[in-house]
Image (cartoon, grey):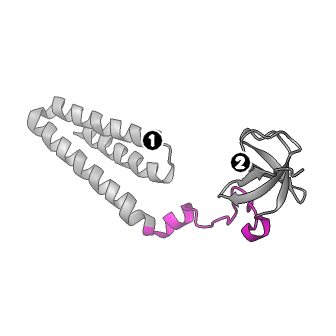
Amino acid sequence: MMLVATLFVTGIVLLAIEVIVPGGIIGIIGAVLMSIGVVVAFQEFGPTGGTIATILALCLGAVALYLEFSVFPKTRLARRFSLSDTSGSRTQPELADREGILQREAVAVTTLAPTGYVELNGRRYEAFCQSGFVTAGTRLKIVDMDAFRLVVTQIKESS
């Protein structure tokens, strides 16, 4: 009986630690220990004792999960371990001011086939060329922009 209780308590403690130290390994070890406790209960106490141990393990696991995900996050300890600050930074800089950039002229820095880089006011932008393949150095007109790139078209040279 003591071995079954020890396995259950150790399993529950490891499941509780899993919330504070994420990664999955500790929680898996806790679940395995509780499963071993159920198997030992079946071996020592027969089907009745094993069934009671299984129900007890499921109930203890459910209570532990409820406490970990419903009660624990509201405690002072959880607030100390949890991240609450945000950085306010962005993964990419602002592309450009839409009104200030549309219908402006840019120069292809790389070959656009149909995507590549253009330069406008000394700054490089990723661009998509509606005209298809364009070589570096070609003059382009900015006709639109989406979240990540400029949409350009080749300027037709008038003779």
Q: Alpha carbon of mark 2 to alpha carbon of mark 1: how far?
A: 49 Å
Q: In the rendered view, tell whether residue 48 sits above or below residue 17.
A: above
Give whichever of discs 2 and 1 has the lower sequence position: 1
Q: How crowded is mark 2: few (under 14 residues within 10 Å), some or many (20 or more)?
A: many
Identify the mark at residue 26; answer none if there is no mark. 1
| Residue 81 placement (x, y as % from top left) | 55, 61
Q: Residues within 10 Å of mark 1 (few under 14, many from 20)?
A: some
User: As rendered, which of 93 and 120 lies closer to the eye?
Assistant: 120
Relative to the observer, which residue lies in front, 117 or 74?
A: 117
Rendered location of residue 159, percent (x, y):
90, 50
Looking at the image, the residue that sits furthest to the left is: 48
Give left or right: position of 129 versus 3: right
What quarter of the picture does the N terminus occupy?
top left
Q: Does the magenta stretch include residue 57?
A: no
At horizontal 83% and vertical 39% (from top left) the residue drawn is: 135
Left or right: residue 153 versus residue 78 is right
> Which region shows up in magenta?
74-102
Reply above or below: 6 against 123: above
Magenta part mainly helix, strand or loop? Answer: loop
Q: Is residue 87 magenta?
A: yes
Residue at disc 2, secondary structure = strand
Numbered circles on residues, count: 2
Q: Which residue matches tag 2? A: 128
Type of amino acid under label 2: Phe
Q: In which quarter of the image is residue 147?
A: bottom right
Residue under the image location 75 percent in, 64 percent down: 102
Secondary-structure class at tag 1:
helix
Name the residue at 78% across, 63% down.
Answer: 103
Q: In which quarter of the image is residue 69?
A: bottom left
